[in-house]
Amino acid sequence: MTSSKVPALAARIERFPIAGSFTISRGAKTEAVTVVAEVSRDGLIGRGECVPYPRYGETPEVTLAAIQAMQEAVASGLTRRTLQAAMPPGAARNALDCALIDLEAKAAGLRAWSLLDRPVPGERTTAYTISLGTPEAMAAATAKAAHRPLLKIKLGGDGDGERIAAVRKAAPESELIVDANEAWTEANLEHNLATCEAAGVTLVEQPLPAGKDDALARIKRPLAVCADESVHDRHSLAPLRERYDAVNIKLDKTGGLTEALAMADAAQALGFEIMIGCMVATSLAMAPAMLVTPQARFVDLDGPLLLARDRDHGLRYDDSLVYPPDSSLWG
């Protein structure tokens, strides 16, 4: 590699097979398709990984093109600070933001948390996801994971009561959080929340479609409800205070770690509990998110556990304990 003081940007699409399949209310997939950005300067390379989300009209090809369109800006000295106004929130900005932070940390000889003046992340218990399926299939998958202390259960509408009852029977000791992925309706909301309460569920994530969740402000919520698709960056927080008790911060929604950290601070100031979440991706995508974990009540960074293989120098997972990244991976 030729050393240069002028920063250079490269990006590519990568694919990683999922162990089996990953199913939510919107469909199933058998591979994680990620986009990686690399910014190089003076013989150093900073990397960031994102997952384009079709729910928001993102595709790998469009995301790749959006990153590549920033080549001139990067060569002209784009920083993580100026990036925030140069690109909209989303997967493309996430990959580039994390790459710029990684490069800046390497150039300064600092770990990313020291560079950003954030607490040193420690090991945390991550949720482990049980994909949507029949009650019988979900019970069988849960039984194999019943030793894990925190399980995230994907639900999908009709039959969710039977699903959650089957899961609870298969994992009587695990803490359960539920993710409906916008699949419930105003008509079944209170019944489904009551069913989850009866099963000892701690948190329900995004039960109603984003933009159609006003009913959450009109009912007495028997357990905590977390916004996911309804929340993106810190500017979307304030209108949610009457409807939600927690927010799921994902770097692909916020457009990178820079905004994710600002959003975590703002969410705490507004009284929200915080979940730090992820898409199904490799450890390179999880590593920056670890910097949000000191502020999070719930950690959901199990993406690499769902893959058939992770990338080299991946995060260390000890069952459900996830550890901060080594500098050979990121930051």
Image: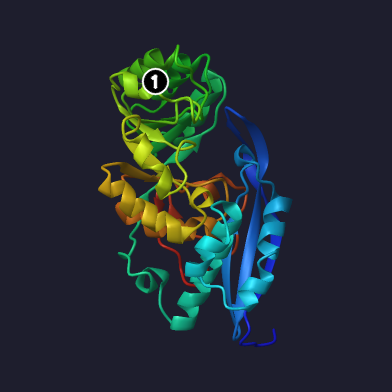
Picture coordinates of residue 296, whole percent (x, y): 33, 49
Picture quadrant of residue 44:
bottom right
* Camera-side residue of 322 and 27: 27
Total tally of numbered discs in the picture: 1
Q: Quadrant of the N terminus?
A: bottom right
* Camera-side residue of 147 and 275: 275
The residue depicted at 64 percent of the width and 78 percent of the height is 75
Q: Is residue 296 above or below residue 290?
A: above
Picture quadrant of residue 195:
top left
Q: Is residue 199 above or below residue 94?
A: above
* Camera-side residue of 277 and 80: 80
| Residue 229 visible in the snapshot | yes
The residue depicted at 63 percent of the width and 84 percent of the height is 6
The residue depicted at 46 percent of the width and 59 percent of the height is 257
Q: Is residue 104 above or below residue 67?
A: below
Picture coordinates of residue 51, whole percent (x, y): 60, 50
Question: Circle 1 sits on which residue?
Answer: 215
Picture coordinates of residue 108, whole percent (x, y): 44, 82
| Residue 328 visible in the snapshot | no
Q: What amino acid does circle 1 point to?
A: Ala
